[in-house]
Image (spheres, helix red, strand yellow):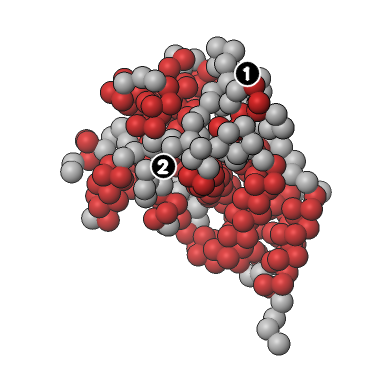
Amino acid sequence: MGCQHLEEVYELWWLGALSEQGCLDLREHLARGCQHCLARVRDAAGTVYMLGLAPKPVRPRPRVKAELLRQISRKAAPNR
Amino acid sequence: MNEEQPAENLLARVARHDVAAMSELYDRYAPRVYGLTAHILPSRDAAEEILQEVFERLWSESPSLSQEGRSVVAWLVVTAREAAVDRLRALRQDAPTAGPQGPGVNAEKGPGAGTRKSKALVIAPTAPKSLDGKTAVMRPRPADAARTPATDSVPSAWLPPPKEITLIDDRLVLLHKAIDQLPTLQRQALELAVFGGLSESEIAAEMGEPLGKVRTSLRAAVTFVKHRRRAVCGTWAANI
Protein backbone atom coordinates (compact mmCIF):
# COMPACT_ATOMS: atom_id res chain seq x y z
CA MET A 1 0.00 0.00 0.00
CA GLY A 2 1.37 3.41 -0.98
CA CYS A 3 1.68 6.43 1.32
CA GLN A 4 -0.99 8.39 -0.54
CA HIS A 5 -3.58 5.79 0.47
CA LEU A 6 -2.69 6.30 4.10
CA GLU A 7 -2.87 10.09 4.11
CA GLU A 8 -6.31 10.16 5.70
CA VAL A 9 -5.91 7.38 8.20
CA TYR A 10 -3.11 8.23 10.64
CA GLU A 11 -5.38 9.93 13.16
CA LEU A 12 -8.09 7.30 12.74
CA TRP A 13 -5.52 4.64 13.42
CA TRP A 14 -4.49 6.32 16.68
CA LEU A 15 -8.14 6.59 17.62
CA GLY A 16 -8.77 2.91 16.92
CA ALA A 17 -11.48 3.86 14.45
CA LEU A 18 -10.04 1.96 11.48
CA SER A 19 -11.06 -1.51 10.45
CA GLU A 20 -8.75 -4.33 11.43
CA GLN A 21 -7.50 -4.53 7.85
CA GLY A 22 -6.81 -0.80 7.82
CA CYS A 23 -4.77 -1.17 11.00
CA LEU A 24 -2.79 -4.07 9.60
CA ASP A 25 -2.05 -2.18 6.39
CA LEU A 26 -0.66 0.79 8.30
CA ARG A 27 1.36 -1.34 10.72
CA GLU A 28 2.89 -3.29 7.86
CA HIS A 29 3.71 -0.11 6.01
CA LEU A 30 5.37 1.44 9.07
CA ALA A 31 7.26 -1.77 9.75
CA ARG A 32 8.92 -1.30 6.37
CA GLY A 33 10.52 1.85 7.79
CA CYS A 34 8.66 4.53 5.84
CA GLN A 35 9.98 7.79 7.31
CA HIS A 36 7.32 9.85 5.55
CA CYS A 37 4.56 7.94 7.31
CA LEU A 38 6.41 7.81 10.62
CA ALA A 39 6.54 11.63 10.61
CA ARG A 40 2.82 11.73 9.92
CA VAL A 41 2.05 9.20 12.62
CA ARG A 42 3.89 11.44 15.09
CA ASP A 43 1.98 14.44 13.82
CA ALA A 44 -1.29 12.53 14.13
CA ALA A 45 -0.46 11.68 17.76
CA GLY A 46 -0.27 15.43 18.37
CA THR A 47 -3.75 15.87 16.94
CA VAL A 48 -5.10 13.04 19.10
CA TYR A 49 -3.44 14.66 22.10
CA MET A 50 -5.17 17.92 21.26
CA LEU A 51 -8.55 16.21 20.93
CA GLY A 52 -7.98 14.35 24.17
CA LEU A 53 -7.62 17.61 26.02
CA ALA A 54 -11.08 18.82 25.04
CA PRO A 55 -12.66 17.80 28.36
CA LYS A 56 -11.96 20.15 31.23
CA PRO A 57 -9.23 19.12 33.67
CA VAL A 58 -10.64 17.56 36.81
CA ARG A 59 -8.79 17.06 40.07
CA PRO A 60 -8.92 13.41 41.14
CA ARG A 61 -9.51 12.43 44.76
CA PRO A 62 -6.34 12.63 46.88
CA ARG A 63 -6.46 8.93 47.64
CA VAL A 64 -5.45 8.11 44.04
CA LYS A 65 -2.15 9.91 44.41
CA ALA A 66 -1.59 8.40 47.83
CA GLU A 67 -2.14 4.90 46.46
CA LEU A 68 0.03 5.57 43.41
CA LEU A 69 2.93 6.81 45.52
CA ARG A 70 2.52 3.88 47.88
CA GLN A 71 2.72 1.46 44.95
CA ILE A 72 5.74 3.01 43.29
CA SER A 73 7.58 3.55 46.57
CA ARG A 74 7.28 -0.15 47.13
CA LYS A 75 8.74 -0.80 43.68
CA ALA A 76 11.49 1.77 44.24
CA ALA A 77 12.58 0.27 47.56
CA PRO A 78 15.78 -1.77 47.24
CA ASN A 79 15.31 -5.50 47.38
CA ARG A 80 16.44 -7.08 50.59
CA MET B 1 12.78 31.82 42.32
CA ASN B 2 10.84 28.61 41.88
CA GLU B 3 10.97 27.68 38.20
CA GLU B 4 9.00 24.73 36.90
CA GLN B 5 11.24 21.91 35.78
CA PRO B 6 10.61 20.64 32.25
CA ALA B 7 8.54 17.48 32.34
CA GLU B 8 11.22 15.60 30.46
CA ASN B 9 13.75 16.40 33.24
CA LEU B 10 11.27 15.07 35.77
CA LEU B 11 10.85 11.95 33.65
CA ALA B 12 14.60 11.39 33.65
CA ARG B 13 14.48 11.55 37.46
CA VAL B 14 11.52 9.17 37.50
CA ALA B 15 13.59 6.77 35.43
CA ARG B 16 16.09 6.84 38.31
CA HIS B 17 13.26 5.90 40.70
CA ASP B 18 12.80 9.38 42.13
CA VAL B 19 9.39 9.28 43.81
CA ALA B 20 9.36 13.05 44.43
CA ALA B 21 9.72 13.66 40.67
CA MET B 22 6.83 11.30 40.03
CA SER B 23 4.76 13.19 42.57
CA GLU B 24 5.50 16.44 40.74
CA LEU B 25 4.59 14.97 37.35
CA TYR B 26 1.37 13.65 38.81
CA ASP B 27 0.42 17.02 40.31
CA ARG B 28 1.10 18.69 36.99
CA TYR B 29 -0.73 16.30 34.68
CA ALA B 30 -3.20 14.20 36.66
CA PRO B 31 -6.07 16.71 36.28
CA ARG B 32 -5.70 16.63 32.47
CA VAL B 33 -5.51 12.86 32.37
CA TYR B 34 -8.35 12.41 34.83
CA GLY B 35 -10.50 14.97 33.02
CA LEU B 36 -10.17 12.77 29.94
CA THR B 37 -10.71 9.39 31.62
CA ALA B 38 -13.68 10.72 33.60
CA HIS B 39 -15.18 12.00 30.36
CA ILE B 40 -14.84 8.61 28.69
CA LEU B 41 -15.79 6.25 31.50
CA PRO B 42 -19.15 6.01 33.22
CA SER B 43 -17.88 5.86 36.80
CA ARG B 44 -15.49 7.90 38.85
CA ASP B 45 -13.89 4.77 40.29
CA ALA B 46 -13.11 3.37 36.84
CA ALA B 47 -11.72 6.70 35.68
CA GLU B 48 -9.46 6.96 38.73
CA GLU B 49 -8.35 3.37 38.32
CA ILE B 50 -7.21 4.09 34.76
CA LEU B 51 -5.51 7.27 35.94
CA GLN B 52 -3.50 5.33 38.48
CA GLU B 53 -2.71 2.54 36.03
CA VAL B 54 -1.38 5.01 33.48
CA PHE B 55 0.93 6.70 35.98
CA GLU B 56 2.13 3.32 37.23
CA ARG B 57 2.87 2.41 33.65
CA LEU B 58 4.76 5.69 33.25
CA TRP B 59 6.87 4.68 36.23
CA SER B 60 7.66 1.29 34.69
CA GLU B 61 8.32 2.60 31.20
CA SER B 62 10.16 5.78 32.21
CA PRO B 63 13.66 4.45 31.45
CA SER B 64 12.85 3.80 27.78
CA LEU B 65 10.57 6.82 27.47
CA SER B 66 13.16 9.24 28.77
CA GLN B 67 15.70 7.95 26.27
CA GLU B 68 13.38 8.57 23.35
CA GLY B 69 13.05 12.30 24.13
CA ARG B 70 9.34 12.33 23.33
CA SER B 71 6.70 14.39 25.09
CA VAL B 72 5.71 12.99 28.49
CA VAL B 73 2.30 14.63 28.54
CA ALA B 74 1.53 13.42 25.00
CA TRP B 75 2.38 9.90 26.15
CA LEU B 76 0.15 10.30 29.20
CA VAL B 77 -2.85 11.65 27.32
CA VAL B 78 -2.64 9.26 24.36
CA THR B 79 -2.04 6.26 26.64
CA ALA B 80 -4.85 7.28 29.01
CA ARG B 81 -7.31 7.68 26.15
CA GLU B 82 -6.45 4.26 24.80
CA ALA B 83 -6.67 2.63 28.22
CA ALA B 84 -9.99 4.33 28.98
CA VAL B 85 -11.63 3.42 25.67
CA ASP B 86 -10.33 -0.14 26.01
CA ARG B 87 -12.02 -0.29 29.41
CA LEU B 88 -15.18 1.18 27.93
CA ARG B 89 -15.19 -1.44 25.18
CA ALA B 90 -14.69 -4.17 27.77
CA LEU B 91 -17.61 -2.82 29.79
CA ARG B 92 -19.78 -2.88 26.69
CA GLN B 93 -18.78 -6.45 25.88
CA ASP B 94 -19.32 -7.59 29.44
CA ALA B 95 -22.84 -6.22 29.43
CA PRO B 96 -24.29 -6.87 25.98
CA THR B 97 -27.82 -6.64 27.26
CA ALA B 98 -27.22 -4.11 29.98
CA GLY B 99 -30.21 -2.13 31.05
CA PRO B 100 -30.21 1.02 33.09
CA GLN B 101 -28.24 -0.65 35.88
CA GLY B 102 -25.55 -2.15 33.67
CA PRO B 103 -22.10 -0.77 33.07
CA GLY B 104 -21.06 1.31 30.12
CA VAL B 105 -22.52 4.38 28.61
CA ASN B 106 -25.62 2.47 27.69
CA ALA B 107 -26.64 2.98 31.28
CA GLU B 108 -27.22 6.64 30.46
CA LYS B 109 -29.91 5.76 28.01
CA GLY B 110 -33.55 6.16 28.80
CA PRO B 111 -35.46 7.49 31.74
CA GLY B 112 -34.05 4.87 34.13
CA ALA B 113 -30.50 6.11 33.78
CA GLY B 114 -30.59 6.89 37.47
CA THR B 115 -27.32 7.30 39.29
CA ARG B 116 -25.03 7.87 36.35
CA LYS B 117 -24.36 11.38 35.29
CA SER B 118 -25.42 12.21 31.76
CA LYS B 119 -22.37 12.78 29.62
CA ALA B 120 -22.78 14.64 26.40
CA LEU B 121 -19.75 13.83 24.31
CA VAL B 122 -18.21 17.22 24.17
CA ILE B 123 -15.19 18.66 22.48
CA ALA B 124 -15.51 22.26 23.66
CA PRO B 125 -13.16 22.67 26.62
CA THR B 126 -14.70 25.71 28.21
CA ALA B 127 -18.40 25.47 27.52
CA PRO B 128 -19.59 21.88 27.55
CA LYS B 129 -22.84 21.51 25.75
CA SER B 130 -24.79 18.70 24.24
CA LEU B 131 -24.99 18.19 20.54
CA ASP B 132 -28.11 19.96 19.37
CA GLY B 133 -29.42 19.60 22.88
CA LYS B 134 -29.14 15.81 22.79
CA THR B 135 -26.91 13.50 24.71
CA ALA B 136 -24.98 11.12 22.51
CA VAL B 137 -25.94 7.60 23.45
CA MET B 138 -24.03 4.50 22.56
CA ARG B 139 -25.49 1.07 22.47
CA PRO B 140 -23.30 -1.84 23.49
CA ARG B 141 -22.10 -4.01 20.67
CA PRO B 142 -19.11 -6.23 20.15
CA ALA B 143 -16.05 -4.14 19.46
CA ASP B 144 -13.92 -4.91 16.43
CA ALA B 145 -10.87 -6.87 17.41
CA ALA B 146 -7.34 -5.51 17.56
CA ARG B 147 -8.13 -2.02 16.40
CA THR B 148 -6.23 0.08 18.85
CA PRO B 149 -2.59 0.95 18.68
CA ALA B 150 -2.51 0.23 22.43
CA THR B 151 -3.01 -3.46 21.86
CA ASP B 152 0.00 -3.43 19.59
CA SER B 153 2.20 -1.56 22.09
CA VAL B 154 3.05 1.60 20.23
CA PRO B 155 6.70 2.59 20.36
CA SER B 156 7.18 5.91 22.14
CA ALA B 157 9.23 6.97 19.13
CA TRP B 158 5.89 7.40 17.37
CA LEU B 159 4.96 10.30 19.64
CA PRO B 160 5.72 13.95 18.96
CA PRO B 161 8.62 15.79 20.58
CA PRO B 162 7.94 18.17 23.52
CA LYS B 163 8.28 21.35 21.45
CA GLU B 164 5.36 20.36 19.22
CA ILE B 165 3.22 19.64 22.23
CA THR B 166 4.13 23.03 23.71
CA LEU B 167 2.89 24.66 20.50
CA ILE B 168 -0.43 22.87 20.90
CA ASP B 169 -0.70 23.69 24.61
CA ASP B 170 -0.08 27.37 23.92
CA ARG B 171 -2.95 27.49 21.44
CA LEU B 172 -5.33 24.95 22.88
CA VAL B 173 -8.30 27.26 23.39
CA LEU B 174 -8.01 28.49 19.82
CA LEU B 175 -7.73 24.96 18.51
CA HIS B 176 -10.80 23.79 20.37
CA LYS B 177 -12.76 26.77 19.09
CA ALA B 178 -11.89 25.63 15.59
CA ILE B 179 -13.32 22.20 16.37
CA ASP B 180 -16.58 23.88 17.32
CA GLN B 181 -16.88 24.95 13.69
CA LEU B 182 -17.31 21.39 12.46
CA PRO B 183 -20.68 20.51 10.93
CA THR B 184 -22.83 18.52 13.36
CA LEU B 185 -22.50 15.14 11.68
CA GLN B 186 -18.72 15.42 11.46
CA ARG B 187 -18.47 16.57 15.02
CA GLN B 188 -20.65 13.76 16.34
CA ALA B 189 -18.70 11.15 14.40
CA LEU B 190 -15.42 12.55 15.69
CA GLU B 191 -16.63 12.60 19.29
CA LEU B 192 -17.83 9.00 19.08
CA ALA B 193 -14.39 8.00 17.80
CA VAL B 194 -12.40 10.03 20.32
CA PHE B 195 -14.44 9.50 23.48
CA GLY B 196 -16.56 6.48 22.61
CA GLY B 197 -13.76 4.40 21.11
CA LEU B 198 -16.04 3.37 18.26
CA SER B 199 -14.89 2.22 14.84
CA GLU B 200 -16.26 3.72 11.65
CA SER B 201 -18.76 0.90 11.27
CA GLU B 202 -19.86 1.18 14.90
CA ILE B 203 -20.29 4.92 14.54
CA ALA B 204 -22.43 4.38 11.46
CA ALA B 205 -24.64 1.92 13.35
CA GLU B 206 -24.78 4.24 16.35
CA MET B 207 -25.80 7.24 14.31
CA GLY B 208 -28.11 5.30 12.01
CA GLU B 209 -26.26 6.64 8.98
CA PRO B 210 -24.76 4.78 6.01
CA LEU B 211 -21.17 3.66 6.56
CA GLY B 212 -19.95 5.56 3.51
CA LYS B 213 -21.42 8.80 4.76
CA VAL B 214 -19.93 8.34 8.22
CA ARG B 215 -16.56 7.39 6.81
CA THR B 216 -16.52 10.51 4.67
CA SER B 217 -17.67 12.68 7.59
CA LEU B 218 -15.12 11.31 10.00
CA ARG B 219 -12.27 11.72 7.56
CA ALA B 220 -13.41 15.23 6.69
CA ALA B 221 -13.51 16.08 10.40
CA VAL B 222 -10.02 14.75 10.99
CA THR B 223 -8.69 16.57 7.95
CA PHE B 224 -10.30 19.82 9.10
CA VAL B 225 -8.89 19.50 12.61
CA LYS B 226 -5.46 18.61 11.28
CA HIS B 227 -5.43 21.57 8.92
CA ARG B 228 -6.65 23.97 11.59
CA ARG B 229 -3.95 22.72 13.91
CA ARG B 230 -1.28 23.28 11.31
CA ALA B 231 -2.58 26.74 10.53
CA VAL B 232 -2.95 27.78 14.17
CA CYS B 233 0.33 26.29 15.30
CA GLY B 234 2.22 27.51 12.24
CA THR B 235 3.52 24.04 11.44
CA TRP B 236 1.94 23.76 8.03
CA ALA B 237 5.17 23.85 6.03
CA ALA B 238 6.74 21.14 8.18
CA ASN B 239 3.96 18.77 7.32
CA ILE B 240 3.69 19.13 3.59
Disc 2 target residue: B143
Label 1: which secondary element: loop
Q: Residues within 10 Å of mark 2 (few under 14, many from 20)?
A: some
State the image coordinates of residue A10 (x, y, percent, origin top left). Answer: 35, 39
Relative to B84, is A16 on the left or the right? Answer: left
* Residue pictured at 63% horizontal, 60% vertical: B56
On screen, residue A31 above or below A47: below
| Closer to us: B87 or B11 | B87
State the image coordinates of residue B237 (x, y, percent, origin top left). Answer: 36, 31
State the image coordinates of residue B85 (x, y, percent, origin top left). Answer: 51, 43
The dot on residue B157 is: none
The C terminus of chain B sits in image quarter: top left
Residue pushed farthest left? A1
Q: Nearer the viewer, mark 2 or mark 1?
A: 2
The dot on residue B129 is: 1
* Residue pictured at 58% horizontal, 65% vertical: B60
Label 2: which secondary element: loop
Badge 1: chain ID: B
Q: Is residue B6 visible?
A: no
Relative to B94, is B116 on the left or the right? Answer: right
Badge 2: chain ID: B
Residue pushed farthest top? B132
* Residue pictured at 68% horizontal, 36% vertical: A57
On screen, residue B115 above or below B17: above
| Closer to us: B182 or B104 | B104
